[in-house]
Amino acid sequence: MRIDIITCLPQLFESPLKHFIFQRAIKQHLLSINIHNLRHYTPYKHDKIDDSLYGGDAGMLLMVEPIANCIRALQKEQNYDEVIYMAPDGEPLTQDLVNKCSLKQNIMVLCGHYKGIDERIRKHFITLEISIGDYVLSGGELPALILADAIVRVIPGVISDASSVLADSFQDGLVAPPAYTRPYNYEGMMVPDVLLSGNHKAIQEWAQQEKVARTKKRRPHLIEKKEVI
Ligand code: SAH
């Protein structure tokens, strides 16, 4: 899979992309991530990419031309399954959406900044808008990294034990069960005995009950959704 990210702050990606999950996927040739500096595509002097808003509202907006030039230049090199804009009012990012994105070959991800981007880009160039939640950040870089991290870990082969990914929260519409590791007894707080029983069936039944109970408590809307289906 190939992810092309368009940003006016390329340096924000340097350290996160050195993180082992990205590096592992890149080394295994399962992923390539390319960062494109929006300022290299502006026709304006002094690397200008933003301007004040028509209508008089405060703040600056990313201009049409640098973004359009960058998207078109990338599209000349290859086809993209999606041109994504990270937007507070986009489609909420869920595991379902992550899984769908992970099946694509090439995606482009545009990070906004300041007050966002000119509406004409959203209307004429963007095929999918994704939000990481109903709150506003100062740029699309962290949302883009969140999207990329979530995608990378579900690409088959990146995490060697696929069953570990499938057992994570939300993959089956429920949250994950409680998890324990050594020691068995920490200051009188014990690990549930069933987990040491060696009885695989009993462990699975316990985990399923815990998942349902936790989901009812923490994400009741997921249980309602499952019951409707
Ligand atoms: N004026 C806009 C907010 C712009 S925030 C509004 O009121 O909707 C600047 C940029 O940060 C956006 O262009 C977007 O790319 C990114 N961003 C901020 N919050 C985000 C969120 N919750 N999800 C995804 N991207 C977000």
Image: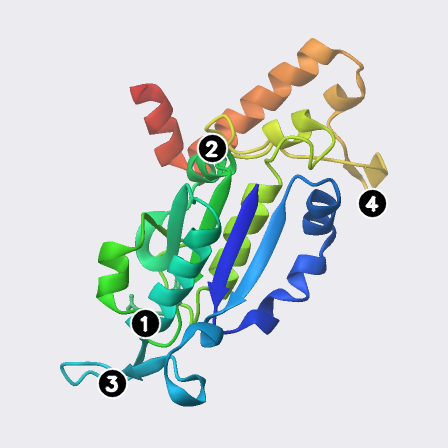
Q: Against 34, is 47 above or below?
A: below
Q: Are marks 3 and 2 in contact (CB under 8 Å)?
A: no
Tell me the quarter of the picture where residue 67 sits: bottom left
Tell me the mark number nearer the camera, choosing from 1 and 3.
1
Which residue is tagged 2? Answer: 215
Which x, y percent locates residue 73? 43, 60
Which x, y percent locates residue 153? 62, 40
Which residue is tagged 4? Answer: 187
Q: Against 198, is 151 above or below?
A: below
Q: Is mark 1 within 8 Å of ligand 1?
A: no
Amino acid type at circle 4 is Glu
The residue depicted at 42 percent of the width and 68 percent of the height is 137
Q: Quadrant of ligand 1?
A: bottom left
Measure the alpha-carbon separation of dots 1 and 4: 63 Å
Decide: few, some or many residues near mark 2? Use Cα within 10 Å; few <14, some 14-19, many ≥20: many
Measure the alpha-carbon separation of dots 4 and 2: 28 Å
Q: Is residue 50 left or right of residue 184?
A: left
Q: Is residue 167 visible?
A: no
Amino acid type at circle 1 is Glu
Q: Earlier in the sequence, mark 1 or mark 3?
A: 3
Tell me the mark number nearer the camera, choosing from 1 and 2.
1
